[in-house]
Structures are given as structure tokens and as C-alpha cells.
Amino acid sequence: MGTTSLVDLSTDVDESVIPSRTPSPAGISRSEPVHDANSSTWAACNPTHAIIHPRMPPHRLSDAQKATRKIKRDQKTEVTKRLHEALTIHLDEQKLKIDSISHAHHVTPKYINDLIGNHTKYHTSHKVQLTNALVHAKAKEMNSDQLAGSRYTLAELRKMVGDDSRMQKLTKDEKANYITALKEHREQKVVSVRGNNIAAARDVLLTTERVVKELDDLRVRTGTYATLFVVRGHINDTIQSSMHGTDNSEDFWEDVYDLPMADYLRQYEQWACTQNQISSRSKRTRLVGDCAQASSKTDHPWTGYKDIAMNYKNYETAVVETYAVRLIGWPSSVKFISPSNIGIIGEIRKLRDALKARTCYWKRSDAGLSRKRKRLPAANKEKNGPSKKAKRNSAGHRDGPKSAEFVESSDEGEAEET
């Protein structure tokens, strides 16, 4: 019996609702005020992600340019025709020669052809090669300012790399830097977002076709059943919702739920378009909460305390010097203040992403190790009572111990309890 699997490829849902969409701009600000937030495209809704910029169409050719290209095309056609004729003559001669060899050595012509044209059909993934890394660097250098249709070809770029004496005398570190740059470029293309709705819809279409083919082939090889739903994640997306079921999987929905598969596709699309469609104020509140929770987790074994208040106003004194820890990797474009006091939602999101990715983290610091602190847990302080050396004030009451460990901020928005 075959197993049944449900494949869900619904696109991520946007977090805000805007009545209409326009073509995405060439560049998107990563720190826009809340009231000016742009959600015209999926790229605009994710300003902290890299963008795959679409290729611009080439300029229209003039009559002279069209005539020149026609001459080149006719010449290329003639050269290709002569090449095919020469190959045909060569193949005929080769066939006669193979027949004579097969009779002389008592083997079939197919056996000889297999020996001549033997090659493997299985290829392992290759690492980034230095040659491709140098071509990539040269392309960025030469084609960055060129218009579409006038950029240098791959053959021309390879020739430029070969003629560049500087690229032929690279050190080991320089070669590693070129390879790393190309590797990061390839990885960025995989996780970047599409720049406009047309490119996003085409990406979904091509990916869905590939997944459908893989599922059908998997059904033939293993006998498994699979159902695929692909729906848009925003009400203004131009993505066409689609569904697919291997073999007779579509009959499952009518046999079990008495509804056709298309009805569930429509309900799934309606549900996806209403997910996370919250207001900008609610979105900001949620981001601030995430940042406050991640940035205030200073209860590390280094400090010896479990509950520590994050103090942005007196950070150096109340946190670094007191507990000998420091927050490393705070985004340079974000002011070091409490997340609740950051007014730009793009900066809050950038800080949240850095904290989640742990590029912004707590690290032990030597700034506070020289200070002698009294490490007495709160539970023991309550149990043992006040110190015998505590002085009495004029009213006859004992004064509690004073220490830099208990510096509190006067601003309510500056401290978040862990």
C-alpha cells in the first residue's frame, strides 16, 4: 500500500494590507516610518532581505542596427550550414570506417560507438572554481554600468580575465576572497526575494511545474500518493493558485469530505490571505516584544544571577561594569536604545533579525571583573535578613545594602525584565 503525503508550498503571507499594488521601485528603503510603510510587493514587505533585481528589457533597435544584425545573422546561418555539411560527410566516412573495423575485429558497430562516445551521466556537485570566481568579479566590474543588450558576453569576459595580468598573479588570500564572494553571491540568490510581482509569479509557476513533475515521477517509482496546494499569500498578489494530486488523489476529497478538491483550494487561499494581516501598530508591538525578550537575556552563568534587568540608559555602569558582560553585534544603523523607543519599524525588524540569527549576542567582558561585587542570591538575602553592620537612620530603621548591582533606570521604557 502506498503512503499519503500532503505537500504545502503556499507562499509566505504578507503582514499588512494595502488596497492596491504598483510595480516595485528600483530600491527600497530599509528604514521607513510606519505611516509611510510600502507593501506594494513582497520585496517591499521584507526590507531586510536582499532583492533579486529583474532584468530590464533592452532598448529598441534602430533600422541601421536591425540591418547590421540581419547581415550578421545571415552570415552565421551560412557558416552553420557549411559546418553541418562537413559534419555529415565526416559521419558518413566514419560509419564506413567503423563497419570495416567491426568486421576485422569481429565486434558489432554499436560496441565501437559505445567505446568512442563513452561518458558518464552522473555528476557530483562541484565547488566554486577560481576561474568562475574571477569571471564573476570581472563581470561586476565591466557590466555594472552597461545597459541591457550592450553587456559583455561570457567569452569576452573570460578573455579579459586571461589578459588581466593582475588576476594572473594573485596571492592565496586574494584567491580565497574571490571564491568566497562568488559563493556568497550564489547563496544570496537562493534566499533573496523577488523584486516585483511578475517575477514572483513566474518563479512560483516554474517551481510548481518542477515539483509536480517530481511528485509524478515519485509516484511511478514508489507508488506514493501526494497532494499539492499552491496559493498566494496576499490578497493583491498576482500568483495563480493551483493544485495537483498524483494518480487518483483528487477522489480522496470527494470520497471522504463530500467536497471537490477545488473547494478546499479556494478555502485554503482565503485562509492564507487573512493570516498575519495585522495593523502596523500591532506589528510594531510584536517586534518590540521579540527584541526586548532576546536582548534582555543576560542570565548567563558568567554573571551568577538569574534575573537581571537590561538598562539601556546606564548600560556601561549597570550592566557592563556590574555583571562583566557586553552586548556584541548591535546593528550599526540602529541607535542603542530600548526597542520600545525606536520609532522606525524597519530598524526594529533589523534588530530582531540580528538577535534571532545570534549575530547580536551577549559576551563576557573584562570591564567589570576588577570590581569586587557581593554575589549573594536574592533568596539568601531574604533568609538571612539585613546585615548587622547596616546603620540605622534617624527614624530608627535599618538602611539596605547599597551596591552598583542595584542601579535602576528612571525611565520606564529603558528596562525590560527577563
Image (tube, helix red, strand yellow):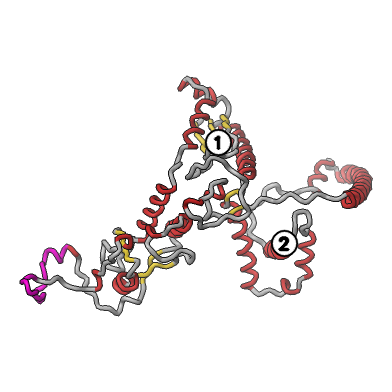
Does label 2 or label 1 sit earlier along the sequence?
2
Q: Tell us which disc is closer to us: 2 or 1.
A: 2
Find disc 1 in the rendering and name its residue. 230
Marking on residue 145:
2
In reply to whether residue 270 is colored magenta, the answer given is: no
Query: Looking at the rendering, which quadrant does residue 329 occupy?
Result: bottom left
Q: Visible in this render: residue 216?
A: yes
Residue nearer the viewer, 325 or 129: 325
Q: Visible in this render: residue 86?
A: no
The x and y percentages for residue 241 are 57, 34
Residue nearer the viewer, 262 or 183: 262
Which residue occupies the extreme bottom position in the image?
Answer: 370
Q: Compared to 103, does 372 lie above or below?
A: below
The x and y percentages for residue 328 are 42, 68
Q: Residue at x 76, y 62 (%)?
A: 157
Query: Looking at the rendering, which quadrant does residue 324 occupy?
Result: bottom left
- C-alpha distance separating marks 2 and 1: 38 Å
Part of the protein shown in magenta: 379-397
Q: Secondary structure at mark 1?
A: strand
- The amino acid on which the numbered mark 2 sits, given as a three-letter code, is Asp
Residue nearer the viewer, 204 or 235: 235
Q: Residue at x 86, y 45 (%)?
A: 105
Indicate left or right for 113 with 132 as reference.
right
In reply to whether residue 382 is colored magenta, the answer given is: yes
